[in-house]
């Protein structure tokens, strides 16, 4: 089976090769006709120069025909030594080409030099400065993201969660990590915003639902208590709870906040050092992660996320598009105006190119020799001739012309002598 499929351009190359071959052969035939026509004429005049030029042209044409043909096949089918070079030595040619590419192209110095000369970071920044280009980039991001999301089925997500993520999480101790994370949150007071939000929501709910509060507290009132007393107690309690929540919200040093911090700090310490707490936390984690509903819940969350993301991709006014355009514009402006950004990007790209060349350069160049080894010798010669044969016919044409000039010059010297 052929390993080199023909391309639409091959027919055009073949026509060009035939035209140049025809031209070269025509010059040889013309030289032969002139030689024969002037062979019996007097050679002590102009016809001597014409005959000598035609003879030299034939010699040059035949010599260069032999040289060009010997590259690809045996001239006239005769097994002359050192002919049909490409079919016979294609494997050696492939290895030499591999060595040439490895030594002269796939080197760290050349890769870094070409990368620096290309000014990739500056070009990217300039390209991203055009709103049209940013839109094109977002279109490509959406296209690739859609393709990736489309290839990841729900069954694959469920299998990934069930067979890979959950077993790893079950076996991985989470208590020390959770304790360290919680300790860092308390030390940096990162949770303040969450506490404020919780207080605001709770106070807002109580403000909007006083009847629910009264019903809940009223159920706990003694049966023998008069209703008017219960109403006063409930109203006072309701007012105190709202005031207390507002005080906690406004005062970041409120005793209730300090008590919550102390509780969370003690929990963080116990998660890291108390074996009983750690064991109970791990047991709770295991019961949660091994529940049969967890994989289905994960798939449901994935479906919701995918649907939201796909919907955002379809709407160019969505936050996904707006934020993406802003990020690209921000990156382009910094790459154009901030040398530190450019230097950082080019340094990272240089490291990546160096790693690729040093790690995979030999394997990449080896593709050349492996591919050439798989080629059939005769077919490889035909394909190579198809690509370069048209230019090689100029050697035959030039050989004919140079041979004619050499014949004239030799005849002139002979005449003078």
Image: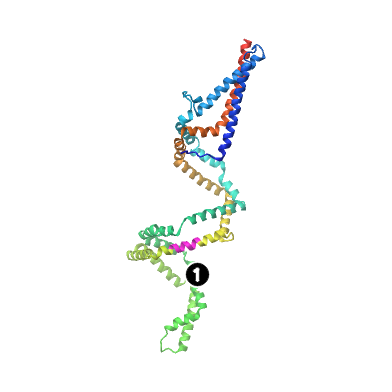
User: Residue extending furthest top?
Assistant: 417
Q: Nearer the viewer, residue 12 or 223?
A: 12
From the viewer's perspective, tell me whether residue 388 is left or right of residue 81: right
The spot of residue 80 in percent (x, y) is: 47, 23
In the image, 256 versus 333, the foreground residue is: 333
The quadrant where residue 284 appears: bottom left
Quadrant containing the C terminus in the rendered view? top right
Name the residue: 40% across, 64% down.
294
Q: Is residue 141 above or below residue 91?
A: below
Above or below — where is 365 with respect to 137?
above
Residue 404 belongs to the span the image colors magenta: no
Q: Residues within 10 Å of mark 1 (few under 14, many from 20)?
A: few
Left or right: 369 in relation to 32:
left
Say which of 36 and 351 sits in front.
Answer: 36
As drawn, which residue projects farthest toward the right? 46
Residue 21 seen in this snapshot: yes
Picture residue at 45% right of the left edge, 64% below the top: 300
* Residue 299 on the magenta span: yes
Q: Quadrant of residue 410?
A: top right
Q: Which residue is mark 1?
A: 197
Residue 408 visible in the shown view: no
**What residue range appears in magenta?**
298-306
Name the secondary structure under disc 1.
helix
x, y (%) of residue 228? 47, 89
Q: At 43% across and 70% down in the image, what residue appears?
A: 260
């Amino acid at each position: 089976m052929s390993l080199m499929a023909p391309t639409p351009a091959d027919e055009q190359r073949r026509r060009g090769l035939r035209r140049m071959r025809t031209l070269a052969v025509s010059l040889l035939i013309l030289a032969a006709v002139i030689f024969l026509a002037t062979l019996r004429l007097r050679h002590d005049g102009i016809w001597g120069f014409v005959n000598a030029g035609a003879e030299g042209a034939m010699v040059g044409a035949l010599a260069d025909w032999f040289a060009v043909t010997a590259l690809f096949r045996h001239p006239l089918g005769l097994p002359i030594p050192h002919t049909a070079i490409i079919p016979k030595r294609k494997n050696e040619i492939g290895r030499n080409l591999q060595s040439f590419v490895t030594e002269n192209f796939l080197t760290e110095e050349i890769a870094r030099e070409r990368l620096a000369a290309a000014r990739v970071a500056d070009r990217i920044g300039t390209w991203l400065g055009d709103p049209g280009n940013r839109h094109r980039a977002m279109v490509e991001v959406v296209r690739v993201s859609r393709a990736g999301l489309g290839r990841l089925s729900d069954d694959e997500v469920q299998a990934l969660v069930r067979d890979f993520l959950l077993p790893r999480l079950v076996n991985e101790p989470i208590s020390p990590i959770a304790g360290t994370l919680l300790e860092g949150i308390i030390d940096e007071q990162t949770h303040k915003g969450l506490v404020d939000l919780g207080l605001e929501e709770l106070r807002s709910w109580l403000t909007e639902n006083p009847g629910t509060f009264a019903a809940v507290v009223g159920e706990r009132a003694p049966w023998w208590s008069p209703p008017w007393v219960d109403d006063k107690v409930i109203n006072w309690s309701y007012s105190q709870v709202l005031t207390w929540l507002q005080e906690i919200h406004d005062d970041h040093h409120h005793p209730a906040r300090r008590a919550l911090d102390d509780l969370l700090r003690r929990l963080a310490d116990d998660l890291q050092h108390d074996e009983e707490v750690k064991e109970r936390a791990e047991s709770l984690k295991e019961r949660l992660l091994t529940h049969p509903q967890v994989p289905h819940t994960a798939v449901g969350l994935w479906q919701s996320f995918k649907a939201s993301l796909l919907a955002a991709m379809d709407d160019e006014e969505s936050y996904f598009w707006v934020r993406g355009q802003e990020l690209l514009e921000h990156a382009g402006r910094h790459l154009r105006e901030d040398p530190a950004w450019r230097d950082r990007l080019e340094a990272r790209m240089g490291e990546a190119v160096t790693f690729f060349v040093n790690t995979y350069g030999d394997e990449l160049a080896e593709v050349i020799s492996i591919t050439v080894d798989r080629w059939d010798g005769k077919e490889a010669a035909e394909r190579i001739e198809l690509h370069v044969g048209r230019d090689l016919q100029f050697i035959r044409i030039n050989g004919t012309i140079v041979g004619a000039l050499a014949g004239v010059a030799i005849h002139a010297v002979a005449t003078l002598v």
